[in-house]
Image: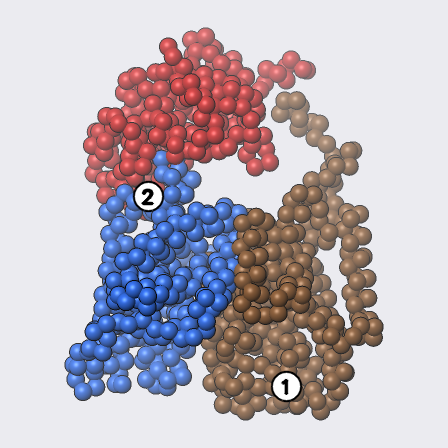
Chain colours: A brown, B blue, C red
Amino acid sequence: MTSAAAVREAPAMRVQRWTPVSVAFTGALTSLVALLAFAPVVLGENTQNNLIQLYFLVIMAMMWNALAGYGGLVSVGQQGFIGIGAYAAVFLSVQHSLNPYLSMLLATLIGGLIAVPVAAVVLWLRHGAFAIATWVVAESFAILVSLDPNPAIGGGTGTSALLPFDLRYTPTQRLHYTYWAALGAVAVLLLLLFVLLRSRLGGSLQAIRDDEEAAASVGVRVLLGKGVLFVVAGAGCAAAGTIILAWQLSVLPLGPDSVFGINWTAKMIFMVLVGGLGTFEGPIIGAVALYVLQTYGPNGGVWYFVLLGGIAIGFALLLPRGIWGTIQERFNVQLLPVGYRLRNVATGKGTP
Amino acid sequence: MTWVSAIVHGILLGGVYALLASGLALMFGVMRIINLAHGSLALVGAYMAFLLTEHLHITTYLALAPVLPGALVAGYFLQRTMLERSLRAGQLVPLLTTFGLLIVIANLLQYFFSPDVHSLDEGRIGTAAWNVSSSLSIPWFDVLTFGVAVFVLGGLELVLRHTQLGRELRATAEDADTAELVGINARAVYARAAAIAVATAALAGVFYGMRSSFDPNAGADQLLYAFEAVVIGGIGSLWGTLWGGVVLGVAQLVGAQINPEYFALSGHVVFLVVLVARTGVQARGLTLTLRRAT
Amino acid sequence: MTTLLAVEALDARHGLLQAVRQVSFEVAEAETLALVGANGAGKTTLLRTIAGAHRPAGGRVLFDGNDITRLPAHRRVRLGIALVPEGRRLFPNLTVEENLRVASGAGGRPGPWTVDAVLEAFPLLAPLRRKRAASLSGGEQQATAIGRALMTNPRLLLLDEVSLGLAPVVVEGVYRSLSSLLEGGATVLLVEQDLARALKTADRVACMLEGRIVLEGTPGELTREQVTEAYFGLRRTEATA
């Protein structure tokens, strides 16, 4: 066909967002979340503890992926918000005697709030400077906390939320409620991201990812889009921080095991890149992978880390698109309907 | 320490940071790779020097003779095998690779050398100092380190401005695709840049080891300071790395004068202020962006 | 006349699009072949594939009888293929002289072209030696880009849209500088949107449409109408109507 003839006979297309596969999978996912809610009744304490860990890993992975995969923002400083979440929760529950779970919720919002001025400082920066600046901001938060004379904060030696929990709940209750809080946080944040990505913001983020200048020239609000992502990621990481607090009770501002530690970012990088950057399902898979490694791999020590590093390198070299990214590429599958598909009305064949 | 002393030592400290940062600046400037393993590679240099001085009973400076070429080879090899491939796969993949390297190296070092602390001998220069006044004493070793930093950065600048390799590096950094079209083997260029970067890391590691004691987990802080130096100085400028290091070092030590606990924080604050101010100066271009963005 | 460049059944993709479909043609030594066609016809992809910047999905590229299809771009430069890319693509922060010297140092082959020779061929560049490439005007950049390709002393020069974005008087200047080159026995494959200029400059013309070569011949053989129809694909609609 020539160009003129081709124009006359272009096949009718319609835009489809939900495919049968994605309907099925979304249904399955929702059922899974509902099922998991019953865990405290059915599963043992150990399992619940482990699952809580999985949940905050999932949250962190989702947030880092939202920033880097969807916003093109490589942040090496999300641990700053994790720490803020944990410490804000401690402060509210210890200093102001608020219910610890209420404190956790408020701390999450505080994390989001603090993300706003941080965004104002760092979002203008270019790639490399942005990454280092986020790291510097996180370190600054950590140092400020360690210097805080307030006994509830505990300065350099850290602090604990044992008291506020102990006063109100038995250890088993704390476990159950923390479990539900964690699961709830995962579900809410997943839903939030899902809605965001399906909205106009999601489309504009994709445009920004592809070509920032072009996007801006057609009116896409680049900074606004990135700002929203940054605030959501800040709140999300703060939520993760509050869960870590509820789970391990005591936190430190400095040192390798610190709640402000760069280790958290290292884990986020691992989870997202192994799972699949820029995909919706990827970070979840990556979190599961890390969780499996942590729980069933060699018990800490040198060889655990060598294995972790080796896997990271292996993926970078062999499966750079991550587990899900590779699957998505090979089989053209999308389980959660965050994209668009063009369907040829006549033949029913689709293209992503 | 007096204020003057803080400033002078801050400048010298800047030399330490600049030396470590030079390789970072090179890799980021040429390849856009944020090498998270840079600090670990520096440590490897220190450990290799340690092995040589322990077993061959030579001075640390002499140990540099085999360590530096070894580092050149290692960097070349690293780029050709791992980083090159990662770069092709995407902008962010090298983050994963270098992170993996960081962990593997740190833990292998721990396995082979135990978590014990070691240190390298700086020779007779070690305790010598120029006693300018009763309150200001300038250790010769720190001056030497600063000198080495200037030498390395100056050398790199010279290579970049006046040699074919330098032109190829700059061209490839700007447009690798077109570079290939004029006959430049981009992969070889990257490999040579990585080789130089790792060699400077090893050099920095050896000097760090002479300056203070080290263990397999040392250097996480140093890496952040080095990155800060690069960014303050302006990514893409080698001399910028030197003055970035100096600004940072002075900020840190002046802050420490006020309160020893403010050491790192002062550096961070100055870092952020410089960035915001610089962005503000570019605000004219920014208002244009703002108008488009909102 | 010996064949310097031969392209056989070449297929190339540009993203998801098939930009070059089963293209075959030859360029003889000392010949100038002009490739014309509308935007998106596949000309730039074709040139880039010949230069080695783009991997073909199928087919072969033969240079001087040797199969270079799998050879990387920088090796092809050493063999004598030089591309002046669409949009000039100078190294913005290198000076004019550095742009020239980086090419000769990397891909240089023995030959008459040196920095001085280039500055002589393009006198407008002489005072601009030490100027940053990014600060040059369009015409100056084009001259530098051509000069940069020449510094490698190529046997085959590929010119992609040298008139793009330039004022007509500037284009005239560029082609004037090129004319001595073209008459001097160089082998040139040039992509040009300006039909008239292509017909005036080339020994042979090939017209591309949607990735295929639809018309080939000498300017003497082909009429303007024939070329215009092939350019827009009008002829075929008439046939099917």
Circle 1 marks a residue in which chain?
Answer: A
Residue C220 occupies which quadrant of the picture?
A: top left
Which residue is rendered at x = 29% and y = 29% of the image? C109
Rendered position, C115 above or below A291: above
Work out which quarter of the rendered image holds the C terminus of chain A and state it. top right
Name the residue type under label 1: Ala
- Left or right: B88, with C122 as reference point: right
Q: Percent x, y for residue B204?
A: 33, 64
Residue C89, position as x, y percentages in the image? 38, 38
Q: Is residue B268 visible?
A: no
Identified at 52% across, 29% down, the residue is C56
Against B128, is C196 above or below?
above
Question: What chain is tagged by disc 2?
Answer: B
Disc 2 is placed on an element classified as helix
Mark 2 lies on residue: B168
The residue closer to the viewer here, C80 or C197, is C80
Instruction: Measuring from the top left, give residue A341's x and y in whole percent.
Output: 71, 44
Q: Position of residue B11 (x, y in %)?
A: 27, 72
Residue under label 1, please give it: A161
Mark 2: few, some, or many residues within 10 Å (few <14, many ≥20)?
many
Taking the image as shown, residue B289 lies to the left or right of residue A288, namely left
Element at label 1: loop
**Residue at horizontal 59%, vertical 18%?**
C234
Say which mark, if any, is on residue A230: none
Image quarter of residue B70: bottom left
